[in-house]
Image (cartoon, grey):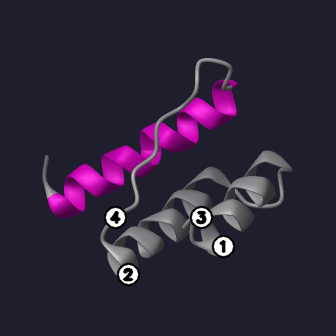
Amino acid sequence: MLDPIVRQTLMQYQAGQVVLEDAAQALLEVRRRTGCLSLMAPPEADARGRALVARFNALVAQEFGG
C-alpha cells in the first residue's frame, strides 16, 4: 500500500506547491521510515517528474548506497 505522504508530495510538487528539494526530501523520509520506497519515471513523465525521480534516487544512493 502506498504511503499517503508519497501521493500528497507528488501532487503538491506537480502543482508547483513544493520545490524539488523539499519534495525529494519528503519522499526520502518515507523511504527512511518504511525502508521500501523506490521511484521510476514513466515514459510519459515530464521534465519536472523526471527531475524529482532523479533527485530522490540520488539521495537514496547517497544515504543507503547503491
Q: Residue 44 shows which numbered tag?
A: none
Q: Is residue 32 above or below residue 60?
A: below
- The residue drawn where x is 54% and y is 31% is 41
Q: Residue 4 shows which numbered tag?
A: 1
Q: Position of residue 53 (x, y in %)?
A: 50, 41
Residues at marks 2 and 4, CA–CA distance in whole angstroms: 9 Å
Which span of residues is magenta-colored? 46-64
Q: Nearer the viewer, residue 65 or 44?
A: 44
- The residue drawn where x is 34% and y is 64% is 36
Residues at marks 2 and 3, CA–CA distance in whole angstroms: 17 Å
Q: Is residue 1 above or below residue 32?
A: above
Amino acid type shown at disc 1: Pro
Amino acid type shown at disc 2: Arg
Q: Residue 33 shows which numbered tag?
A: 2
Q: Residue 36 shows which numbered tag?
A: 4
Whether residue 10 sits left or right of residue 22 in the image: it is right
Q: Position of residue 26 (x, y in %)?
A: 54, 70
Within the magenta stretch, is there residue 18?
no
Whether residue 65 sits left or right of residue 12 in the image: it is left
